Amino acid sequence: MKTRKLFVVMALFLAGTALFAGAKKESGGSTLIRVGTEGAYPPYNYVTEQGEADGYDVAVVKAIIALLPEYRVEFVPTAWDGIFVALEGGDFDLIASNLGWRQEREEKYYLSTVPYLWGGSHLVFKAGRTDLRSLRDLAGKKVAAGVGTSSTTQLENFIKQTGVNIEIVFTDGNIVNALTEIESGRVDATVSSIITTQLTAESLGYKIDSFPIADPEWTSTSVNSIHLLFPKTEKAKTLRDQFDTALEQLHRNGKLRELSRKYFFGKDYTTKEALQAGQ
């Protein structure tokens, strides 16, 4: 397991988006569906040493496509800070990249009405620190935060509501970079999914501590639904509806639970109840 974790993270540095340049085309009676994914956020999505997209997001889409024989799929790893622009520009047909529900996204895009995962955020910092036990302890400190992520928006809202003086150091959303900044002491903490953070920190040899964010002003609950995201067009809405039907089937037949346990160390995070129960 440790070897796998190491090569996954190394692949993030070695693999480029050019490996998966997408193009619109149809052949063999099936329509090509291009899927944007960050490709740098294991175990949700990453690029293997063989240059192939992998991770839970990728596996879910493949399982959906297996139920929709009229389609075939191509994955397009894309830097987080440009992934929404690329979607709007037609570079791909949907995004599968651990996207939590947000009102702004609901208004601007079509989200799958069926969540395929549930998650939550932790405050992450270097092991051994005893001065960080709540968001208020970050007063006068620096926090690495990905541009445009839901956790960054929540942190910005927390600062506005409380007046706590926290300096946000914006990053490209790559957890490797955020953890490296923490290890070097250039920032004090980051807000991230603890699953990805623990996996990445171990592979890098970094020791971290964390705690779930429970401050009353934090605008998110302890859990958040994760969705596929489509552009707001009639064609995309039809595709979204087909994907929703497939996701419902994958929930019923246990395939999503199987994939969750495969990628998340034996844990089922496919429903809110399962996440909270820690099954």
Image: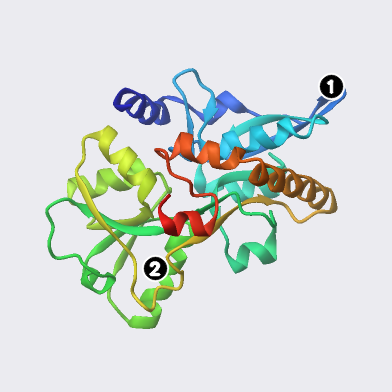
Place residue 204 in its image quadrant. top left
Of the residues under marks 2 and 1, which one precedes in the sequence?
Answer: 1
For image coordinates 67% across by 46% down, the residue present is 252
Task: Give the residue type that dot 2 points to.
Answer: Leu
Which secondary structure, mark 2?
A: helix
Identify the residue position indicated by label 2 in the image: 155
For image coordinates 46% across by 24% down, the residue present is 48
Q: Quadrant of the N terminus?
A: top left
Task: Give the residue type that dot 1 points to.
Answer: Ser
In the rendered view, tell whether residue 183 sits above or below residue 216: above
**Along the horizontal axis of the image, is 103 left or right of 213?**
right
- Residue 148 location in percent, x, y? 50, 58
- Residue 72 location in percent, x, y? 74, 28
The disc placed on residue 269 is none
For image coordinates 43% across by 48% down, the residue present is 172
- Residue 242 location in percent, x, y? 79, 45
Evaluate whether residue 148 shows in this view: no
- In contact (CB < 8 Å): disc 2 and disc 1: no
For image coordinates 61% across by 41% down, the residue present is 254
Mark 1 Cα shell of 10 Å, populated few (<14), some (14-19), many (≥20): few
Place residue 40 in its image quadrant. top left
**Along the horizontal axis of the image, is 132 left or right of 265?**
left
Mark 2 Cα shell of 10 Å, populated few (<14), some (14-19), many (≥20): many
Q: Residue furthest right?
A: 29
- Residue 133 location in percent, x, y? 21, 67
In the rendered view, tell whether residue 219 sits above or below residue 9: below
Evaluate whether residue 200 shows in this view: yes
Between the C-alphas of marks 2 and 1, the distance is 46 Å
**Along the horizontal axis of the image, is 236 left or right of 77?**
right
Identify the residue position indicated by label 1 in the image: 27
Which secondary structure, mark 1?
A: strand
Place residue 101 in its image quadrant. bottom right
